[in-house]
Image (cartoon, rainbow, N blue to C red):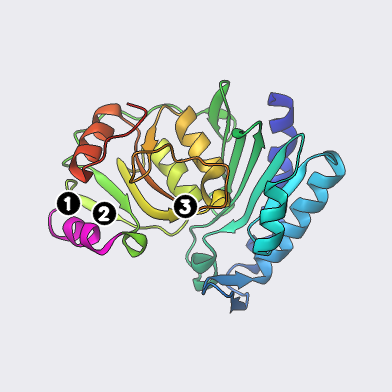
């Protein structure tokens, strides 16, 4: 699996540097049927990655965000050696607005679980990657656990837009952390949390291609996560998932208690 990762990293890095960065700050956009943004960069990155993965791994299935719902659903039903899951540009709204917080995200799913994940931030030239059971890395160095801090002075990475109204109001009035951030890229959120750049996390609605790679990176870094219903975050389906997470177990327990969640895995 390490040899596979060593081939994927330069493939994704070079594609992002050549397809995303040159279009940053100077790309037009349009709106998809669900109201989300689509840019030329999304499509160019997806086409390039699909072509290169298909050349080197022709027996694997390829699932990406910028496919129709019908195509995505059909791919989920196929028998396969492996399933590539790509978000060619996670953080498209940031990208279109000139905000330098976006990434390419690629996961490999085998036998119903993510076995490899890679998230590349071309602005900072940071490549987060993980192999299930083998390790997690930032660029070519192991991603080391952050030091422990109590939850109260910490930073919460929270996407308010997709939360139930009552929960969003409660968080706005009496949050259990000192300050809150909402950055706009699910894949990078997971990676930044894994790197200790935030202490607790909450998001109300993520798609498979948003979280598959980042969630594995976070998990392999030792983090704890569940949905708002207390279920595991990963689900091999196209159903959007909520996410509650913290790198430290005590943080996670306190965070779940505050949210009135009983994680099924604890």
Distance of label 3 from label 2 (alpha carbons): 15 Å
Residue 244 placement (x, y as % from top left): 34, 43
Residue 188 placement (x, y as % from top left): 48, 48
Q: Secondary structure at mark 3?
A: helix
- Residues marked 3 and 2 touching at CB (< 8 Å): no
Residue 65 placement (x, y as % from top left): 63, 58
Distance of label 2 from label 1 (alpha carbons): 9 Å
- Residues marked 3 and 1 touching at CB (< 8 Å): no
Residue 255 placement (x, y as % from top left): 23, 39
Residue 67 can be seen, yes or no: no
User: Is residue 229 magenta-colored?
Assistant: no
Residue bearing the label numbered 3 = 186
In percent of the image, x 23 and y 57: which residue is there? Answer: 167
User: Is residue 168 magenta-colored?
Assistant: yes
- From this view, report whether residue 141 is shown above or below residue 98: above
In percent of the image, x 65 and y 68: which residue is there? Answer: 23
Left-right relation of 34 to 60: left
In percent of the image, x 51 and y 60: which residue is there? Answer: 91
Q: Which mark is residue 180?
A: 2
Q: Secondary structure at mark 1?
A: loop
Distance of label 3 from label 1 (alpha carbons): 21 Å
Left-right relation of 114 to 184: right
- From this view, report whether residue 112 is shown above or below residue 43: above
Q: Which residues are magenta?
A: 164-175
Residue 106 can be seen, yes or no: yes
Mark 3 crowd level (few <14, some 14–19, many ≥20, 10 Å Cα):
many
Q: Main secondary structure of the magenta part?
A: helix
Q: Secondary structure at mark 2?
A: strand
Nearer the viewer's eye, disc 2 or disc 1?
1
Residue bearing the label numbered 1 = 175
**Placement of the C terminus among the 4 image quadrants:** top left
Pointer 3 or 2: first along the chain: 2
């Amino acid at each position: 699996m390490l040899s596979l990762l060593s081939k994927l990293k330069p493939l994704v890095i070079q594609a992002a540097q050549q397809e995303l960065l040159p279009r940053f700050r100077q790309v037009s956009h349009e709106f998809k049927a669900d109201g989300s943004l689509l840019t030329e960069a999304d499509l160019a990155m997806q086409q390039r990655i699909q072509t290169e993965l298909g050349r080197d791994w022709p027996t694997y299935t390829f699932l990406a965000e910028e496919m129709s719902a019908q195509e995505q659903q059909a791919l989920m039903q196929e028998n396969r050696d492996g399933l590539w899951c790509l978000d060619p540009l996670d953080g498209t709204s940031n990208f279109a607005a000139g905000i330098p917080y976006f990434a390419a995200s690629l996961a490999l799913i085998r036998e119903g679980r993510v076995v490899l994940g890679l998230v590349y931030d071309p602005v900072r030239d940071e490549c987060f990657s993980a192999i299930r059971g083998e390790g997690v890395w930032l660029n070519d160095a192991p991603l080391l656990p952050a030091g422990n801090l109590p939850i109260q002075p910490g930073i919460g990475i929270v996407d308010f837009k997709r939360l139930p109204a009552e929960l969003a109001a409660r968080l706005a009035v009496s949050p259990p952390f000192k300050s809150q951030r909402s950055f706009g890229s699910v894949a990078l959120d997971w990676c930044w949390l894994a790197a200790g750049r935030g202490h607790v996390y909450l998001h109300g609605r993520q798609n498979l291609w948003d979280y598959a790679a980042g969630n594995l990176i976070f998990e392999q870094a030792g983090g704890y996560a569940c949905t708002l219903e207390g279920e595991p975050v990963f689900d091999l389906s196209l159903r959007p998932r909520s996410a509650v997470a913290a790198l430290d177990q005590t943080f996670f327990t306190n965070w779940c208690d505050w949210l009135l969640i009983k994680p099924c895995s604890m």
